[in-house]
Each structure stands twice: as C-alpha cells, then as structure tokens.
Image: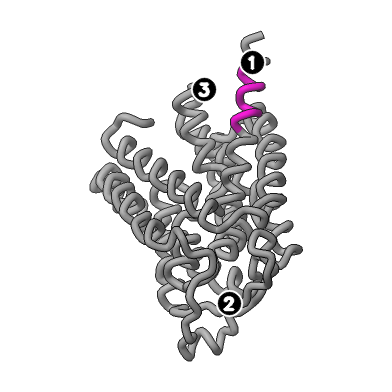
C-alpha cells in the first residue's frame, strides 16, 4: 500500500515537473529533484539521476513538438550546442580539482546568488512580448540566426534575428561547465543566453532550450547509469508523468503571452537559486 501511494505521488510530481519544464525550457529535473529529495525522501544522487532521465523525456516530448511548430530554431540550437558540450567536457576535467580543494559548497552558493540576481533583467523585460529588433552584428549575420513563427497569443507572425552570437556562445559554455560541475540542468543559462544575450523572443529561447537540454542530459545520465545511481522503479514511475506533462506544456506554450511564461520562468529560477544556496549551506541534500 505504501509503495502504491509513493508511486502515485511520484507520477503526479512528474506531471508537474514535465509541465513546468517544457513551459520554461529548463527541463523537468529542476522541479523534480527537490520534490524527490524534500517530500519523497529519495537520496540526492538517485534524485539527480532520475531528473536527468526526466529531462531527456521532456526534451523528446516537447522539443520535437516545438520543432514541428516552427518555434524552436534548429540552426541556433546546433550552433550553440557545440559550446555547451565543450563546457561540459571542461567541467568534467575541473571536477577533480574542485573536489580536491572542497570548493563545491562555495560554487553552489555563488551560482545560486547569481541565478537569483539574473532574474532582474526578466523583471525589466516582463511587459515586452517581442524584443525590440536590433541590427545583427557581422558574425550573427554570417551564422544566419534568424527565423519566424506564428504567435497564437498575439495572433501575428513574429520575425527575429539573433545578435551577439559570441556572448551566446560564452554563456552556453558556462551552462555546460556549471551543469557538469554542479549536477544541475543547463536549461536555466541556455534560456538566459538566448533571451538576454542574443535578444531572441522568449518563446523561441524556451522552445530551443527544450530541444537542446536532452543532448546534455543524455551525456550526463550515462555516468549515473554506470555508477548504478538510476533506480528503474523510480524512473518507470516518473518518465510517463514527465512525458505527459511536457506534452501538455508544449501544446499550450504558444497560447500563453510571453510575460506569463517569463513570470513562471523567473519563479522557477529563484527557486533553483535558493535550492543551490541551501545545498551549499548543507541544509538541502
């Protein structure tokens, strides 16, 4: 009986995680990990391993839908994923040094604070549905980082062109680095890189991030499989829920106003920052 209740709660939590993950571009892990640890008593390593699998499920479900709807930009995703992957590889090499000098707690606190303060530009841009067009620089023009999609909430076609491609690459590299070092999803920085760094519409940033996060999570999850830190029973209960939630999120994202999505993204980002600070202080995990 206890097991049935546990699995039922796990399924409900997974639906919520998938829904928020697809609407924000962060993946289901950001929401699922604290629920598994704080409310369901799952050990942190197993919670992280499960969250990585759920992120792959979120990306597979919502990412494909966003691509077919024309909201996610394949060209931008592929050009930026190179930097994220390079950052993840660098993070794996640096992990030994960070652990040797016991700097993980410091990094958790610093990055948690950075995430919370990174929401300030979101408040400034909250009322903006479509970013003000900026002339792309030479490299951004050469990379052809443009596209268009039909915004169902605004009832109009939105055209855009990315700018400051080098800044986007730098933040994406940092996203991979942080993901590899701290074991959190890189979706938060990916969305910020495209939204604030490259001046892309928020829906495009969110949808493209949802498509990209599966690649990063698939790479990291292999390590957890090898270490035996992925519980088949927990995964079997979470993946269907995350898939269902992310499918719902992908269905309704384009019907929301961007400011509503930005509000959800900001709240989840603040929660993630607080979670990291608490982890650094030894309170969480």
Compute the Cα span from label 1 to label 3. Answer: 11 Å
User: Which comes sooner in the sequence, label 3 or label 2?
Assistant: 3
| Residue 115 visible, this angle | yes
In the picture as drawn, the residue positioned furthest to the right comes out as 68
Q: Foreground: 56 or 250?
A: 250
User: Where the C terminus falls, by quadrant?
Assistant: top left
Q: Which mark is residue 5?
A: 1
Which residue matches tag 3? 40
Q: In which image quadrant can residue 16 be found? A: top right
Which residue matches tag 2? 160
Q: Which mark is residue 259?
A: none
Residue 112 location (% of width, % of height): 33, 47
Q: Residue at 55% across / 58% down in the picture? A: 258
Left or right side of 217 for 193: left
Left or right side of 17 for 98: left
Q: In which image quadrant can residue 205 be found? A: bottom right
Q: Residue at 66% across / 70% down in the picture? A: 74
Residue 60 location (% of width, % of height): 70, 52
Q: Is residue 164 above or below residue 215?
A: below
**Which residues, given as a range, are shown in magenta?**
5-13
């Amino acid at each position: 009986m206890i097991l049935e209740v546990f699995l039922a709660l796990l399924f409900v939590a997974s639906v919520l995680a998938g829904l928020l993950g697809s609407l924000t571009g962060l993946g289901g892990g950001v929401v699922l990990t604290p629920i598994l640890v704080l409310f369901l008593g799952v050990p942190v390593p197993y919670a992280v391993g499960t969250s990585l699998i759920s992120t792959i499920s979120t990306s597979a479900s919502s990412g494909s839908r966003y691509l077919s709807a024309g909201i996610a930009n394949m060209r931008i995703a592929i050009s930026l994923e190179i930097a994220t992957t390079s950052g993840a590889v660098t993070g794996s090499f640096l992990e030994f040094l960070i652990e040797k000098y016991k700097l993980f707690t410091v990094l958790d606190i610093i990055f948690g604070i950075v995430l919370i303060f990174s929401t300030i530009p979101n408040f400034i841009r909250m009322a903006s549905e479509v970013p003000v067009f900026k002339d792309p620089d030479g490299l951004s023009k050469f990379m052809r980082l443009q596209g268009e999609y039909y915004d169902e909430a605004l009832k109009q076609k939105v055209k855009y062109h990315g700018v400051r491609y080098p800044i986007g690459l730098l933040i994406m590299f940092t996203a991979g680095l942080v993901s590899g070092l701290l074991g959190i999803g890189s979706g938060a920085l990916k969305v910020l890189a495209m939204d604030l760094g490259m001046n892309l519409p928020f829906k495009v940033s969110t949808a493209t991030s949802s498509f990209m996060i599966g690649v990063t999570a698939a790479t990291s999850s292999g390590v957890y499989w090898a270490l035996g830190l992925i519980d088949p029973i927990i995964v079997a209960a979470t993946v269907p829920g995350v898939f269902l939630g992310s499918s719902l999120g992908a269905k309704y994202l384009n019907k929301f106003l961007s400011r509503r999505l930005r509000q959800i993204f900001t709240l989840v980002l603040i929660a993630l920052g607080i979670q990291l600070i608490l982890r650094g202080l030894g309170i969480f995990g």
